[in-house]
Amino acid sequence: MSVARLTFRSGVWNLAANVGQQALNFLFFVYTARLLDPTAFGLMALAMVLVDSFTVVGRFGLVEATIQRADMPDALQNRVFWLLQAVGLAATFALWFGAGPLADAFSHPEMAQPLRWLAPVCWLLNSSAVPEARLQRAFGHGAMARSTLWGVTAGGAVGVAFAVAGFGVFSLVAQKFVSVAVQCVLMWSKERWRPSLPTLAPTTEIRQLVGIGFHVTSANLVLMLNTKLMDLLVGLFMGAATLGYLRTAWRCFEFVLHVCVGPLANVSLVTFSRVRSEPARLFVAYGRMLEIASLAIFPIFFGLAATAPLAMPLVFGDQWAPAAPLMQALSLIAVAGAPNPFFVPMMTATGNTSRLTTQGVIHIVLSLLLTAAMTPFGVMAVAIAQVARATLMTGVSLWMMRFSVDLPYAATWAAIRPGLISAGFMSIVVWSSLYWHIFAPLTGWLLLSTAVVAGVAAYGLGLVLGFRQELGELWNEARALLRRDEPLDAATPV
């Protein structure tokens, strides 16, 4: 089967998994937000700063490193598995026994117990790393999608039950733990490979994998810390409740990004790796993925910016109204959020992993300086700092891709232009209609629904009038990929 069709089918499965996972997560999140106060979400966000940091470092980037390899012998996979087990257990014990001192250091002693019960997540995620890598290498995204959906469903159901029973922040802890545990078990059930007894003798190959993984880990850690540093500083200096508001606004941003860009970003590493020796096909693959991502995320983010003061209290409850201005500010990250997820896959696939470390250092320095500088001026200033950081880093990432693989800047602009211009037109229409009360006397959900319909119509009109040729090209490629009985034309981009 061609790389194009494999990518397309994997992208469909990733889309199904991401839409299902994020939709379920978001529904559970909305329901629990109505039951819990902002402080509970703030404490959970602070605890996850440590859990996610230990997880990213503890995985060594070995999932991405093994996907990048042309072949992966069983003996090497076995060594990778046992290495990850040892590191995962070490991280779990470190968090379990260090929960109290860490919580005191964060000036939130009430965080100790939630952190302690989240510690096993580090080991569970490392336990599923090898089957995850194997399934991705084989384009087994269908099995991964089903595992993810069942995990999210089980975790969400448990979390809601705990919230109804009055367990507070432990509702969120139970949701996370159960979700990860179920996904781990189901992923192993879909994979036939099983580890043999450990062999501890070092090999050149394992050192090479760890070397590649180091650069990937640096990039992943930076991407994670960009938001976690924000959580940490806001939680420390403004309190858990303020962090809860910011985390809720950011959760909306993450929901859209994971649904619209996640499926493409997940398969882009495999796709870019398959065509890395053909620059023309590589650039077209990048452009198409970025174009589709932009067409999806720009209208949603721009629409959120226009409707947030109306939508946030309706969806989450009146107690979450202070999160609306934060949502409007963070929506501006959409412009930078489209190309950034493809930087790590591009550099990894083309063997330029050292660039990831360089970009990571720049990223973390910018994030730390901007967030720390804006923290004294309030939470809105922190949100604006994230927009500035993301915009600057988009420029750095595009420059590095141009320098490393000669990717033209024009390719990025051509890909984002249809969605960006059409979404800008749409946001003006929606904001104006709400500001001038064009839909009066409608209120509440009816007003929000009408504004959404008007936005969809305006966005579609902008695309049809301004970018008919681009839409036609995407439609023709989609039709070619959907035809199972016809070979793909040589002009197919990937």
Image (cartoon, rainbow, N blue to C red):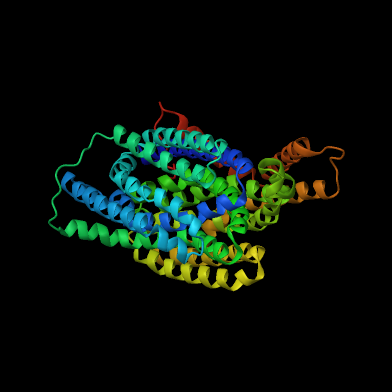
Along the line of sight, the residue nearer the viewer: 116 or 185: 116
- Residue 97 position, x and y percent, is 34, 57
The N terminus sits in image quarter: top left
Is residue 281 among the parts visible in the rendering?
Answer: yes
Query: In the picture shown, does residue 479 fall above or below 136?
Result: above
- Residue 66 position, x and y percent, is 28, 50
The residue under the point 76% across, 46% down is: 430
Along the line of sight, the residue nearer the viewer: 392 or 369: 369
- Residue 205 position, x and y percent, is 19, 56
Query: In the picture shown, does residue 394 fall above or below 306?
Result: below
Along the line of sight, the residue nearer the viewer: 401 or 68: 68
Query: In the picture shown, does residue 229 fall above or below 169?
Result: below
Is residue 407 among the parts visible in the rendering?
Answer: no
The residue under the point 24% across, 53% down is: 86
How many marks can you see?
0
Quarter holding residue 221:
bottom left
- Residue 132 position, x and y percent, is 33, 42
The C terminus sits in image quarter: top left
Quarter holding residue 8:
top left
Q: Is residue 14 left or right of residue 260?
A: left
